[in-house]
Image: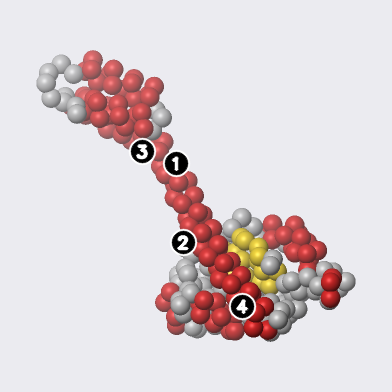
């Protein structure tokens, strides 16, 4: 493949056909002997710079999209493990509960049922008025606890990058808390291991809104699982 053919191929694959064709025509006019002239190399250098500048933002977007896809897949794994845990408790105890819950009507994290509110109503309110404001790890995430980290000084969680730490001073980076029982239950479901987020500032966090009602009006608890990178966009809900 000649140099001109190679440049044309690169241009096509970067949706820059018109610009690439212009440069190729210029190269053909400049080329008077076999091989590559100094003028041709100068044009080629300019062209490659233009291609790199144009393509770089697209490649960055692709990288972010791949990370988002990976974290959504991890959220699905956590959701599946929590659902299996819940169903096992239904069999063993007659009533389901999530990791970290002592009973089906206890909370995990900092969000409790408002007075005279059922679980489904509380979930809807949280999604519409609170979750949509949690756009990054610097948001108020104090309603959540870590999925896999039982304590801020847990060596396994630190080594496995299962919690979000500030790389400059190793301080705890987000407002999420810890639930020892919940994190240990979760780790058991993953072979005593955790999962790290593909994002530098990410970490998996969750909360449980208590179940409510009684008898035929009883409602199961519900769970919100998110990546601290951007909970408003990267989250899953689980209502058995």
Residue at 40%, 38% (x, y): give it: 55
Secondary structure type for disc 2: loop
Compared with 58, 190 (above or below) is: below
> Can you identify the residue that label 1 sits on?
58
Quarter of the rendering containing residue 176: bottom right
Q: Is residue 56 visible?
A: yes
**Could you tell me how far apart the alpha carbons at marks 1 and 3 are, in whole angstroms?**
10 Å
Neighbours of disc 3 within 10 Å: few (<14), some (14-19), many (20+): few
Q: Position of residue 148 (x, y in %)?
A: 53, 76
Marks 3 and 2 sit apart, C-alpha to C-alpha, by 25 Å
Residue at 84% in and 76% down: 215
Q: Earlier in the sequence, mark 3 or mark 4?
A: 3
What residue occupies the far left of the structure in this picture?
Answer: 34
Q: Label for residue 52?
A: 3
Find out whether the residues at labels 4 and 1 contact each other: C-beta distance under 8 Å: no
Q: Quadrant of the C terminus?
A: bottom right
Numbered badge on residue 198: 2
């Amino acid at each position: 493949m000649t140099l001109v053919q190679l440049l044309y191929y690169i241009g096509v694959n970067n949706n820059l056909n018109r610009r690439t064709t212009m440069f190729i025509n210029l190269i053909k006019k400049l080329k008077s002997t076999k091989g590559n002239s100094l003028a041709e190399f100068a044009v080629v250098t300019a062209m490659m710079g233009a291609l790199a500048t144009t393509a770089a933002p697209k490649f960055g977007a692709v990288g972010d999209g791949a990370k988002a896809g990976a974290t959504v897949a991890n959220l699905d794994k956590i959701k599946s493990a929590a659902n299996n845990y819940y169903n096992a408790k239904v069999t063993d105890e007659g009533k389901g509960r999530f990791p970290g819950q002592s009973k089906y009507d206890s909370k995990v994290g900092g969000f409790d049922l408002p007075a005279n509110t059922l679980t489904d109503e509380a979930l809807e309110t949280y999604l519409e008025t609170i979750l949509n404001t949690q756009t990054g790890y610097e948001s108020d995430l104090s309603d959540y606890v870590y999925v896999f980290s039982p304590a801020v000084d847990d060596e396994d969680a630190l080594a496995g990058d299962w919690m979000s730490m500030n790389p400059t001073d190793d301080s705890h980076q987000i407002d999420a808390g810890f639930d020892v029982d919940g994190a240990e239950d979760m780790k058991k479901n993953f072979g005593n291991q955790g999962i790290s987020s593909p994002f530098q500032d990410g970490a998996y966090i969750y909360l449980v809104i208590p179940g409510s009602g009684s008898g035929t009006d009883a409602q199961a608890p519900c769970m919100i699982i998110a990546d601290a990178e951007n909970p408003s966009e990267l989250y899953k809900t689980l209502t058995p």
